[in-house]
Image (cartoon, helix red, strand yellow):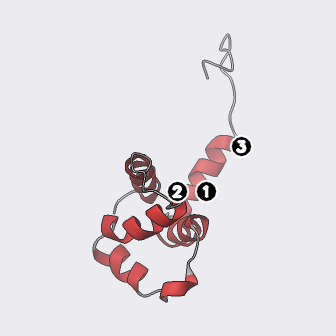
């Protein structure tokens, strides 16, 4: 029931506070991410073979494909494509 996009944002905030000598940010994120999930998302994550996801981009792509509802994606896309300015409203204000 959790918003996967929000979860990723918070997770990235936490990971960006960590610096480990000679470890790339991708490695840090990939190592810590399983500890941030629980229930069905954790089971799903552990069902993937260890070497099948090797970059942070790959992980976020498969995670959002699985857990970010298509209805929300469609809703957000519609909001973006139907964006209009109100009368006397600047683009900055909008």
Relative placement, left or right, of 40 versus 21 is left
Relative placement, left or right, of 20 versus 57 is left
Q: CB of mark 3 within 8 Å of CB of mark 1?
A: no
Q: Which residue is mark 1?
A: 74
The CA distance from mark 2 to mark 3 is 14 Å
Q: Which residue is mark 3?
A: 81
Q: CB of mark 1 within 8 Å of CB of mark 2?
A: yes
Q: CB of mark 2 within 8 Å of CB of mark 3?
A: no
Q: Tell me what residue is drawn at x 69 percent, y 39 percent.
A: 82
The CA distance from mark 1 to mark 2 is 5 Å
Q: Find residue 71 and report its horizontal and vertical position in percent.
A: 54, 61
Residue in front for this viewpoint, 8 or 29: 29
Q: Tell me what residue is drawn at x 44 percent, y 47 percent.
A: 16
Q: Find residue 21 and report its horizontal and vertical position in percent.
A: 45, 56
Residue in front for this viewpoint, 51 or 39: 51
Dot 1 crowding, Cα within 10 Å, few <14, some 14–19, many 20+: few
Element at badge 2? helix
The CA distance from mark 3 to mark 1 is 10 Å
Task: Determine which quarter of the picture holds residue 62.
Answer: bottom right
Residue in front for this viewpoint, 47 or 17: 17
Q: Is residue 23 above or below residue 75?
A: below
Relative placement, left or right, of 85 versus 51 is right
Dot 2 crowding, Cα within 10 Å, few <14, some 14–19, many 20+: few
3 or 1: tag closer to the N-terminus: 1
Q: Find residue 45 and report its horizontal and vertical position in percent.
A: 42, 79
Q: Is residue 93 above or below residue 41?
A: above
2 or 3: tag closer to the N-terminus: 2
Q: Which residue is mark 2?
A: 72
Element at badge 1? helix
Q: Find residue 65 and report its horizontal and vertical position in percent.
A: 56, 70
Element at badge 3? helix
């Amino acid at each position: 029931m959790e918003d996967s996009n929000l979860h990723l944002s918070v997770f990235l905030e936490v990971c960006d506070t960590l610096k480990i000598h000679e470890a790339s940010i991708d490695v840090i994120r990939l190592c810590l991410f399983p500890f941030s999930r629980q229930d069905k998302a954790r089971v799903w994550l552990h069902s993937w073979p260890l070497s099948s996801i090797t970059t942070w981009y790959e992980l976020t792509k498969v995670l959002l494909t699985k857990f970010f509802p298509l209805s929300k994606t469609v809703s957000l896309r519609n909001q973006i494509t139907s964006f209009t300015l109100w009368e006397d409203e600047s683009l900055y204000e909008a």
